[in-house]
Image (tube, coloured by chain):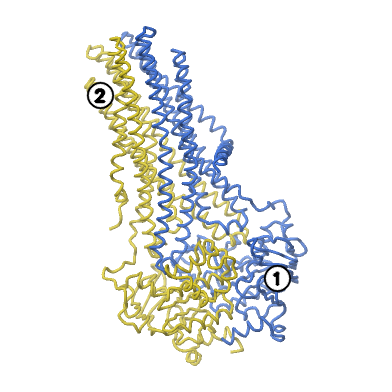
Chain colours: A blue, B yellow
Amino acid sequence: MKKSRVSDRRGTMKRVIACIKPYRAVLTLSLLSALISSVSSLIFPMLTGKAIDAITGGDGSLFMRMMLFMAASALVTALFQYLMNLANNRIAYGISREIRGKAFAHLQRLPLSYIDSHPHGDIVSRIVNDTDQLSDGLLLGFTQLFTGVVTILGTLICMFAVNWVVALVVVIVTPLSIFTASFIARKTFSLFYKQSEARGEQTAFINEMITGASVVSAYGMEEENQRRFDEINSRWAHLSLLATFYSSLTNPVTRFVNSLVYMGVALSGGISALCGIMSVGGLASILSYASQYTKPFNEISGVVTEFQNALASAERLFRFLDEKEESPDDALPSFTLREGKVDVSHVRFSYSPDKELIKDFSISVRPGMHVAIVGPTGSGKTTLINLLMRFYAPESGSISIDGQAATSVSRTSLRKSFGMVLQDTWLKTGTIRENIALGRPDASDEEIRAAAEECHLGSFISSLPEGYDSVVSDDSDGISAGQKQLLSIARVMLTSPGMLILDEATSSIDTRTEMIIQEAFMHLMEGRTAFIVAHRLSTIRNADLILVVKDGDVIESGTHSEFMEKGGFYASMYSSQFRA
Amino acid sequence: MSVRLSSFIKGYRRVAVLAPLFKLFEAVLELCVPLAVASLIDNGIARGDMHHILMMALLMVVLAILGLAASVTAQYFSARAAAGFAAKMKSALFRHITSLSEIDRDIIGSPALITRLTNDSNLVQNGINMFLRLFMRSPFIVFGAAVMAFTVDSSLAVIFAVVIPVLGFVVFLLMRYTVPMYSRVQGALDKVLSRTRENLSGVRVLRAFGKERDEEKAYGADLEALRGLQMSSGRVSALMNPLTYVIINFAVAVLISCGRTRYNLGLAEAGTIVALVNYMSQILAELIKLANLIITIARAIASGKRIQAVFNLEPSMSEAPDAVTEGSDKETAVEFRDVSLIYREGGEPSLSSISFSVRRGEHIGIIGGTGSGKTTLVSLIPRFYDVSSGSVSVFGTDVRKWKRSALRSSIGYVQQKAVLFKGSISDNIRWGRMDASDDEIKRALERAEAYSFVMEKKGGLDSPVEEGGKNLSGGQRQRLSVARALVRCPEILILDDSSSALDYATEARLRHNLSELDGLTVITVSQRAGSLMTMDRIIVLDRGRIADMGTHEELMGRCELYREIYSSQFGGEA
């Protein structure tokens, strides 16, 4: 376990570096600016020294020159520091923008099986929080790491110029503090990873409970939820404390190592001075360099541990990005609907390997046929829709439309040829107008209005303070489930699709409105292939073919009148409805 | 009075005070090291005292160890204070959000609430952590250096007295500019989170309409907006370091030229100037460390304000201090007196002049067109909203006088959208009553017609339920949420169109099971006249008003609207 984490860390590091690659030019600018500003800031003390010498030497013109140089040096340092900061901002924010964009695009291509089986809050946390963590880490890293490295190199050069022996000693001892820093870094990485995971878990819980807030209050689960939240929260707080604490150890520990080095230099220097090998002045300069040299190490080692946080988040992000996408189908031809002949042959499917749902399903639907699918709840009706829409793929068997295998065309083009209304309606955050025009953003106002009127939404929409421009969202109040369903139907009406899939599309609409909608639907479905899942058998009486599904199998197929004549499962279901 | 964020430091006050003090102690120790070195040179080398050299070296080791101990302690304390603060704040924020009504929550919006509980809280935690580590140490060193400067040469040190306020002013100015900017950055992040979340919840619709590319584009625009805001706030923050650098180094230049004048007048020595320059560079070194802190703190303040704004939202439905836990009239289960409700300011009323009463044990049906106010009406009973005028009473007591938890525990409310939660099936049923035994759960499942499908699952009662019940069909979710309501043995059961996904046979059996529960008051909202025919009374709603009320037969006789609804379902066969 531990071993894989370490190798993961390296792999993650490589991938982070790969993300930076496109910013080569900006990175060069940043490095160059860091170099210039650091060198310039290293020169400044020399200039002050010379200026002071000029004072004591009484050299007025040298003094004025030094003053000018100092001003120039200060300005150059500041200017390039600013440039470096801007460049680093550009890299860090740019990378987080790209990674988020990539993650979102990835999300569009992930199979529904992934989305259905993972807590949405955790996915959100990866895309939002972990990316933020990564970009913060990168920003900090770039800003401090480069200047630190340049400063170290600069001082090193100065030290070698003054006394190469002491410089060598210091260089040899340096790995000690690097070693401790990397030791702590390795330790903190796994802590940061766990912290990030806990944060994901917490976000998932928050998301779930805020989404289901009304159920929470209806059942008075506030206290119990608070308890669960606090449980996750205290687990997170503990990990967070450990991660923060361990990562913040680097600084004191490396400083301690440095102090010992410093003491060693002082002691050996003192003894050498006592023995007359070295002058007191020499000792003083060695000591001052030794302390100057170790300072940037403190900063860098601090950055290195903070950087673990970014890496841990990056790893969670990359793991998400590595989830298998649906096979790319951009190259596949787009589907063109000709008549709407649908053939399903020998389809076998299950959501989980341990429970078979659909064993061997075959139907052949003639163009323009209206197929109703009925059956007890949980019998697999919605699954058929998942398969037709290619939300899920059958394990074996095939589905073809107009003789083209569903898998031989692009998913989007296939889906667009269906108009789908589901029982679980969904509104996008936006205006009523945008919601109706979801499938056809270029629709004119008249068309949108016409679709809304056809769905009996006119008076509801005009009762809203801002009419068609009223902003709604999926979790907003004041819109009934029925109205949401009507809006979803209006969406499909507007696109006038070649085929229709209606999964309990009118379950929350009152029957009188439904009758009016039904007319509109009949008009829409005329000559078009349609699949209708419904419990209200009255709405499917007119279907050309009724499939009675039970436990994933078609147990009866025929028309309403055939069924009623011969009796059977359908007949008994139908009569139960009216003899309540 | 709303909660102040600063109150969450309670319980961590001691560590929050100790952390900077230990940091200060470390800084003092650091200052002692040069003294030890000086003594090593002056008293050890100069006098040839080997023993003294060794003692001083030993002292330096002791100082290093003490410094290590002090700073490790400080880091631990500040990490503890920050994590503890954040944990307490998040816990209180979660509690506060839960206490808000739907209408209150709508003001900020769910996605924004999630950002506050996660991202914003993290930023506040970081801010506190960094603040505790540096806020004592840095001023100590800055002011310490200034004081030392005054002891060296009080007239040259005036420059320090000018530079420090100038630096303070620059920091203040930058903070003032950046705090609102970071607040906007977080606002843009809300949007990004919102779209991510929406893309997950609406994945089927979005893919059905082939909106993936459009969504990517729109998301790209959101990200671009976020990046733009980050860049512009970053541009201002990026000034921090260069500005301090320039100010201090210019001060150094001024110091040197003034020093030169004084030197030429014989008022100062070269050593004095060197010492002052050194103090100035010490300040610089410290301030550069501080610069990153300032950015972290500016972000923490921006996020803290956003969190405070949530705490400032007073729950619009308050609970009376003398709230009761029992009704005064056991026989009248529910009574509406001239109730009106307006959701949105300026909007049309969703309900107007509703009056009716329900006796204990009665079965009431509510029917009406889409958007006629059925759901709104029943959601007033467990007090999800407060009426705009009139009153709603449960067991003879106005719902506003009930203790909310007591009111809701006597009601089993099954909502139209059956929401389940991640966990097992029995976990979900136990939402109804935490201490329900397995037998009670089984009985509730049987009554809700859910027992057989639960038992068909491999794990039975322990079968996993995904977030929102994604792994169950609509009808299964509905039956489980009915079972969840039944397990609490409510006195009033409200079924809001909660069998719409059930086939008729199952629904009929469910209704039959409910009718066998003695003394249970049942209020059923339905689209299907057939489901309500056997009710004691049926309320017909039309655009927020009661059109008529009576038994099926009465309504068939006199209510045009009801007849229309009925015939729309049963057609010619009626």
Q: Are marks 1 and 2 on the same chain?
A: no
The answer to whether residue A83 is visible is no
Looking at the rendered structure, the secondary structure element under dot 1 is strand
Left or right of residue A144: residue A492: right
Question: Looking at the image, which is closer to me, A123 or B411?
Answer: B411
- Amino acid identity at mark 1: Thr
Q: Quadrant of the C terminus of chain A?
A: bottom right
Helix, strand or loop for disc 2: helix
Residue B375 in the image: above or below residue B178:
below
Taking the image as shown, residue B441 lies to the left or right of residue B214, namely left
Q: Which residue, given by chain and number where applicable, does mark 2 sit on?
A: B148
Q: Can you tell which of label 1 and label 2 is closer to the viewer?
A: 2
Q: From this viewpoint, is residue B94 visible?
A: yes
Q: Position of residue B450 (x, y in %)?
A: 54, 74
Query: In front here: B156 or A3?
Result: A3
Q: Nearer the viewer, residue A271 or B447?
A: A271
Residue shown at 53%/52% (left/top)?
A123
Q: Residue pushed farthest right?
A: A403
Q: Which residue is mark 1?
A: A529
Judged from this view, the residue extending furthest toward the top is A276
- Which percent across, then down, holds residue B45? 31, 11
- Seen in the picture, residue A445 relative to B75 is either above or below; the reply is below
Snapshot quadrant of residue B523: bottom left
Residue occupying image coordinates x 41% and y 35%: A249
- B23 lies above or below B513: above
x and y percentages locating residue A116 in the rendered image: 58, 59
Q: Quadrant of the N terminus of chain A?
A: top right
| Disc 2: host chain | B
- Residue type at mark 2? Met
